[in-house]
Image (tube, grey):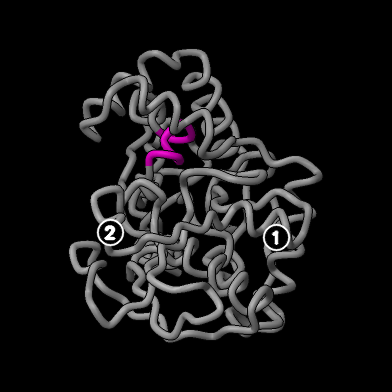
Amino acid sequence: MRRNAGWQDDMNPLDESRPLTIGVVPDLYTRPLWVSLKETLNVAVEPGPAADLAERLRGGQLDGALLPVLDCARMPLARAIPGLGVCTDGPSSGDALFAKVNPDSLRRVAVSPHDSGRVALAQVLLAERFGLTPEYIPVPSAQYGRDDADGVICSGDVLLGEVNLYPHRFDLGAWWQELTGLPFVHFLWIGTVLAPLARLRRVLALALRASQGNRAALVTSAAAEYEMSPEAVEEYLSKAAYHSVGSAEMDGLRVFLELARKHRLCAAEANIAFC
């Protein structure tokens, strides 16, 4: 059995004095969930793409990670932390399809190779709403304007300078609500059965509470990092997402997993277990 990177041969893995190593996808709308972790004693925060974090979690190199829900469902030993996540309920600025054509005419769609959660949502929606299975072309964000792509799936703010290339904007959150009437869960906190799940759950809940209690500092640090005005950050965070997972969000999660299985985005037995 492979040990977690924080474990030492003479240390009990349940010992709360040992450091926790937690991976995060550093999107702006995930920020309230993890930014306060960086100030938490005995916690190391490691940002990275979801696919890399999932692989490190499987290999025991992380205690926990903030991952798109399909990455969670594809990991048999994963255990999700209840009550915490990144959710939207209707339109948001965080998830969008930009297109040169009407959605029912899409043939080739550019996507980030690191953006598995947003792409999976778009795949389900295009299949359910339009019966479409376009070709998805993994490209760096710098190449989103390539001529052979009819559209691009990305954060709603990424292409503000490319509006002439992609004149049509479609909000994926609004499409999901029209289809299901339910919120959508984008990310969950995940540990494995080998992780100190009770401690992880407590640390993550306290970090979210600290971020909510010090909103001004969160906005200021985000504005500096993303080179945005504090007003723009506040507006984005207010509209993009929220971070509690209740019964309606769980219903939306179950419907999404059913549709992901239907469209073969994950195995027929894929599911998410909570700790």
**Magenta span contains residue 129:** no
- Residue underneath mark 1: 273
- Residue underneath mark 2: 164
Q: Can you give x and y, in whole percent of width and height, for residue 6 in the image?
A: 35, 47
Q: Quadrant of residue 60?
A: bottom left
The residue type indicated by label 2 comes to Asn
Q: CA distance from mark 2 to mark 1?
A: 44 Å
**Disc 1 crowd, CA 10 A, few/some/many (<14, 14-19, 20+):** some
Q: Residue at x 33, y 53 (%)?
A: 5
Q: Can you give x and y, in whole percent of width and height, for residue 113 in the image?
A: 33, 71
Q: Residue at x 41, y 49 (%)?
A: 156
Q: Can you give x and y, in whole percent of width and height, for residue 62 in the image?
A: 40, 53
- Residue 250 appears left or right of 169: right
SS under mark 1: loop
The residue type indicated by label 1 comes to Ala
**Above or below 56: residue 159:** above
Q: Which residues are magenta?
A: 28-34
Q: Residue at x 37, y 77 (%)?
A: 150
| Residue nearer the viewer, 165 or 5 | 165
